[in-house]
Image: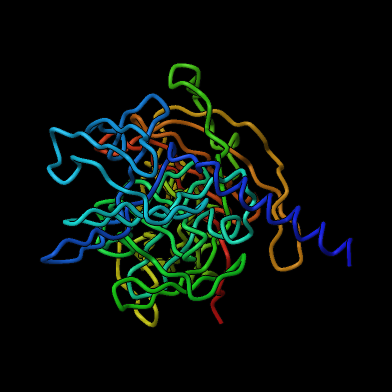
Amino acid sequence: MKFKFFSGLILALLIIKMRGQALPVAGKWILTTVETKSRTVHPYVVNRFSPDGKVFFFDTEIGTWTRQNQGIELTSGQIKLYNGFFPITEHTPDRLVLKTDSVTFHYRKAYDRRDNNPVFQNLTGTWLMRGTVSTYVRLDENGKFSMVEIQENGSVGSIGQWWFIPAENVFVVMADVDVLRKKDSILRINKDYMEVENEGIQYQLEKQPEVLAVEHLNFENDSVEYEVSEQTELPWTDDGLRAFLPGIKNLRYKRSVYLEDVKTFHRQYYSVDVDMDKEKHQIKFTTYKERDEERIRVSAVTKGRVLYNNFFPQKNLDSYRIIDRNRPWQYDGKTYGCTVVEGVNGHAHYQYWMINDMPGVFAKVIYESKGIYGNFVYTVTELEFIDYQN
């Protein structure tokens, strides 16, 4: 009995001591709810109370704060509600409530990634949102939010910030986007899949392979010496194309477009019809974009009697160099040798994998350049299937 009595007394004294110690207010808090006599709003914006007595909305200083007994004195010239003495009516390590007769502020503590929360670990990375439009979302560990939406003629990107609130099992997005903005309730999550609810709408997202960097075509235009190439120096000849290509009906390619903001590849699929007109001595390649059950024509290129492009049906190169003459490439259980050429066309850099035994058929094409707005463009096109004539 004495042991139980003393144990209970020690516990009670510890509780009294802990209650007597004021929890720290300084830090980053998310303002989830503001209640006034006329309305209630849920702004989900970030307030930071700095140790030196300043108050910030995101990174903008809006006023000052001081701790006084069981409350906080706020002063702000920018926000009218942030003025006066605010008694603290609730304060835990992850929750703070400031209440006066006219307004109540409800705060949740922004997650500190050093806590190694498993939900946070699953959240970080790149996600593909299910839907008719390919939309990629990236949640960086450092709090940066990025979104890229793939459109018919390119992509549109947005950036902002995000925070995780473990006590509510939600994450908050502040960015100029139409989906996932502000509060996102996590309904289900693991390392590969996530379901969230935002303003009554549920979204399903799938984790994507993370590619933090790509293997750049690191050469300057003036470092590629032009080779005045005889036909024998490249694996293909004009006669070789005309002899081999009539046996090909269709080529299917996967094109992977690197999305730098979200650190992953977006994959598109193409098919190429090969037509040979022996009477006109012409070869025609017609490229189609494969989308669901549709084939959308993208381009068509033709090669006639006169040799005008050593790299048909790809773009000719202003200057180039051969970096390998027998690089192995696997297809259908066999290994083929490729001549690998890298060069430039205007400001764009290319690397061509030309299959030595298949004139006109590229195993791989790597393309790198800057877009019209100065953005980085990097694609890898890889052969997946060859459909031969019957």
> In this image, 323 relative to 1: left or right?
left
**Closer-to-camera residue (61/380):** 61
Identify the residue shown where x is 33% and y is 43%. Answer: 47
Image location of residue 267, percent across then percent down:
47, 61
> In this image, 194 relative to 290: left or right?
right
Identify the residue shown where x is 73% and y is 48%. Answer: 328
**Closer-to-camera residue (254/323):** 254
> In this image, 208 relative to 357: left or right?
left
Q: In this picture, is 56 found above or below 34?
A: above
Identify the residue shown where x is 44% and y is 38%. Answer: 27
Identify the residue shown where x is 39% and y is 44%. Answer: 70
**Closer-to-camera residue (334/254):** 254
**Closer-to-camera residue (54/326):** 54
Q: In this picture, is 194 found above or below 44?
A: below
**Residue 235 falls in which quadrant of the image?**
top right
Residue 156 seen in this snapshot: yes
Quadrant of the snapshot with the C terminus: bottom right
Residue 299 seen in this snapshot: no
| Count of labels in the image | 0
Image location of residue 254, percent across then percent down:
50, 62
